[in-house]
Amino acid sequence: MKILALHLDNFTDYARLRGMPYETTELRITIDEEDFYAIIEKITAYEKDELLGIRVGNLRNLNTLGAIYRISLKAVTIQEALYFCQAYLQETLPLIQVVNSMDGDSATIRLSIDNDKDQSNRIILETILMVVAREIKIVSGEDTEMTIYSPYFKTGYPSDWRKGESFMVKFQLTLLKAALKDNSHWGLDILIPEYLGLIEELKTPENFSSRIKKAMLGMAKPQLPGLETVAYAFNQTSRTLQRRLEEEGTNFRQIAEELKRRICNLLIRHNRYAITDLAYLLGYADSAAFIHSFKKWYGCSPKRFREQRGVS
C-alpha cells in the first residue's frame, strides 16, 4: 500500500521541532505502509506523549496541499465538501477507512484503520481528526459547533474533544462560506485536473500510460489535449505513441475516456455546472454526446445521478 509522503512529513517536521534527530535526504512522493508505521513508531517512542497525534494535527491543515485546499474552499454544499475530504484521504492515505453521514442538522465523519497497530493508529487517526476539524472550520466558519471523539479521551485533551466508541468528528450543518458568495467563476474546472494529477503521482508502477495521463492532466485547459498535441509534447508521432500504449494494453482513446470520467465524477457534484457546461468542459460536441457517455459510466443520466446524491 502506497501512502502520500506528505502525511509522514507532518510527523517528521514535528519531531524536528521537538529536537528529534531525524534526517532523510531521499525525496519521496510516496512511502510504503511498513515504512510509514516504522517511522511513526520511532517518533512515538521518542516523544512518549499520548497526545502526539493532536499536537501534530494542530501544526498542519490542508493549506499545505495546494489544489486540495483550493478545491475545498469552492465547495458550496456540505455534501460536496465531505466528498472531497473523503476522496482525498482514500487516495492518499488508503489505510484509513472514511465514512460520512448526515442526520438531521448534523454531519459526522468517522475514521478507522483495520489492523492491530492500535498505538500507532491512535496517533494517526487523532492527527487526521485534527486536520479535518480545522479544515471544516476554515471552510464553514470558526463559529461552527463541533465535537471530536476518541476512544482514548482523558484529562488533557482539548475542550472540544469527548470520549467516544470510535474516532469521529461531528458538526452542525451550516451554510459554507463559499455558498454566501458568487463563486461560479472560481475555476474549479481548472483545479480538478491539477488535483487528479497529484493523485496520479501515487500510482505505481511508473509506465508510459501513467506518464501520458499525467501529461494530459497537466495540459488540460480544462479540456483534455488531443492525440496529436500529446504526441508532439513527447516528441513522437501519433502512430508511435499509440503503438507504445498498445504494448501496455491500452490506447489513447481509452485513457482520454478514463480521465474524462474521473474529471466528471468530481465536477458533477458541483451544482454550479449545468449539463451543457460539463459537456463543454469535457470536450464533447454537444450535451447529447456527453449524456450518452455519462450513462455508460454510471448507468443513469446526470440529472438522476445528482438527485440520488442530493445535488440540486
Image (spheres, rainbow, N blue to C red):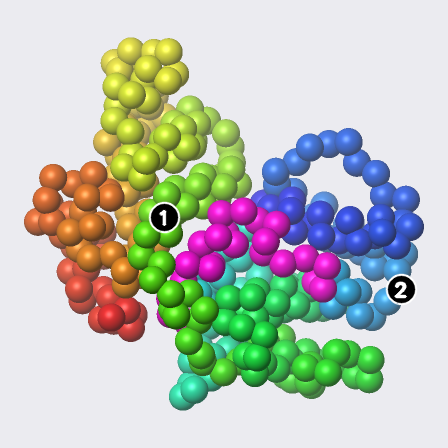
The picture places residue 290, in percent across and down from the top left corner, at 15, 47
The picture places residue 101, in percent across and down from the top left corner, at 44, 77
Amino acid tagged 2:
Lys
- Label 1, residues with CA under 10 Å away: few <14, some 14-19, many ≥20: few
Which mark identifies residue 242? Answer: none
Q: Are marks 2 and 1 in contact (CB under 8 Å)?
A: no
Can residue 40 be seen at all in this image of the molecule?
Answer: yes
Q: Left or right: 71 with respect to 51?
A: left
Residue at image point 24% right, 42% down = 282
Q: Residue furthest bottom?
A: 104
Q: Left or right: 19 with respect to 97?
A: right
In this rendering, the answer to whether 173 lies above or below 188 is below
Residue tagged 2 = 48
- Residue range corresponding to the magenta coloring: 57-78
- Which quadrant of the structure image shows residue 255? top left
- Which quadrant of the structure image shows residue 76? bottom left
Give the position of the C terminus as an image quadrant: bottom left
Q: Indicate the secondary structure of the residue bearing disc 1.
A: loop
Residue tagged 1 = 187
Q: Earlier in the sequence, mark 2 or mark 1?
A: 2
Q: Left or right: 131 with respect to 308?
A: right
Q: Nearer the viewer, residue 19 or 258?
A: 19
- Was residue 306 drawn as part of the magenta stretch in this picture? no
Residue at image point 71% right, 52% down = 10
Q: Indicate the secondary structure of the residue bearing disc 2.
A: loop
Residue at image point 86% right, 67% down = 49
